[in-house]
Image (spheres, grey):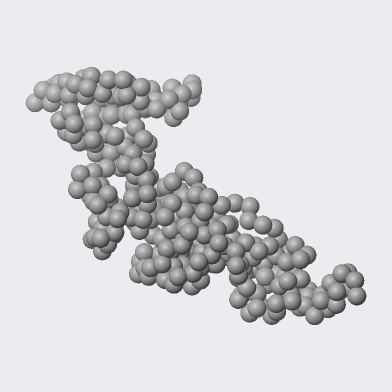
Amino acid sequence: MGTFGKMVELSNQIPQGPSLDRLIAATASKQRRNITREQLLDLGLDSNAIKYRTGTGRLHRVYQGVYAVGCPPQTPAETAAAAVLACGPGAGLSGLSAAAHWGIWPRWPETPEVIAPRERRRRGISTYCTTLPGRDLRRHLSIRVTSPARTLLDCAPKVAAKQRIRMVNSARVNKWTRVSDDQIADIVARNPQHRGAKALRWFIEEDVGHRSESELEDILYPWCDHYALPRPVTQVSIGQYRVDALFAAEKVVLELDGWDAHRGRESFESDRDRDATLAAQGFLVVRITWERFKQDPRREAERLAQILAARRRTAA
């Protein structure tokens, strides 16, 4: 019997029909187009049926025991979802993969990182075996993933200090994560021997209350401390506006301007309109650019100190 004849014979033994296709698609749609071998068997397929659908391109093997439906994974998130399924019940995306999925790290690692309660090695997946409590795992955008706080703990020793500050501050303000200082303190307290605990402790001991949305804002508190400036409140709302930093006692608003976020005529006009509205409410807006910050941080600090002192004298 030729190859075509074998395929015909095999197809006659396989559950067919649009209803089965819909069931497979419905299951996969909840898992970023992925489905496990066990799930296919539960739907009524056997080994021959799975082999047939793989041969005809309906299923595409991603990892051992996991298939993508319709076509191979098209995005890092689809590959990551398959990796979590491949590592079994209780597994979750972790490390830099989790950070990328939460949106607090700018790029996906080439190899998905997964944490699981059982040792299960899969080619093409970086696995770490440990059992996490339920509060340290979440489901985000159809993928089981470590909680934002646990993600920070796992990533802290893997990245440089500057990158760690950016990641934590992103997690503080990201709409999906909104990590609080209490959550950071909790994850550190529950995992004091973890390699990331020491690195995260700085954020709750020295950087407490800091919220920033840019690399420029990340360095604000260390800069204030170094030049003996009072620490402002960051990312605070004043009426309809949210400002980078506010020295409340002096009513001085500090805006840290990067070129990418403030270039163009529309941004130029919007910034000045906002400054005028805040001035009408008694606030003085001071703008410091990234270039000035880098070139002469001492000069900027001394000038800001003079402004704050003058505002205090005026208010007295």
Percent of width and height locating residue 175 = 41, 49
Q: Where is residue 97 in the image (x, y as percent from the top left)?
A: 47, 53
Q: Is residue 287 visible?
A: no
Which quadrant of the figure has residue 302?
top left
Q: Percent x, y for residue 5? A: 89, 73
Is 82 on the left-hand or right-hand side of 194? right
Residue 27 or 93: which is nearer the viewer?
93
Number of dots carrying numbers: 0
Quadrant of the drawing holding the N terminus:
bottom right
The residue positioned 27% from the left and 29% from the top of the image is 253
Up the image or down, 42 lies above or below 166; here it is below
Q: Give percent across and percent down for residue 52.
A: 76, 71
Q: Quadrant of the C terminus?
A: top left
Which residue is at 78% across, 65% downward?
Answer: 56
Q: In which quarter of the view is residue 30 placed?
A: bottom right
Q: Please name the residue shown 27% across and 20% down the image.
A: 296
Q: Above or below — where is 105 with respect to 14?
A: above
Is 80 on the left-hand or right-hand side of 270?
Answer: right
Of residues 263 and 292, the one nearer the viewer is 292
Considering depth in this image, is 279 or 119 the residue closer to the camera? 119
Looking at the image, can residue 284 be seen? yes
Residue 21 is left or right of residue 42, and the answer is: right
The image quarter containing residue 297 is top left
Residue drawn at (19%, 48%), measured in percent from left and top?
Answer: 205
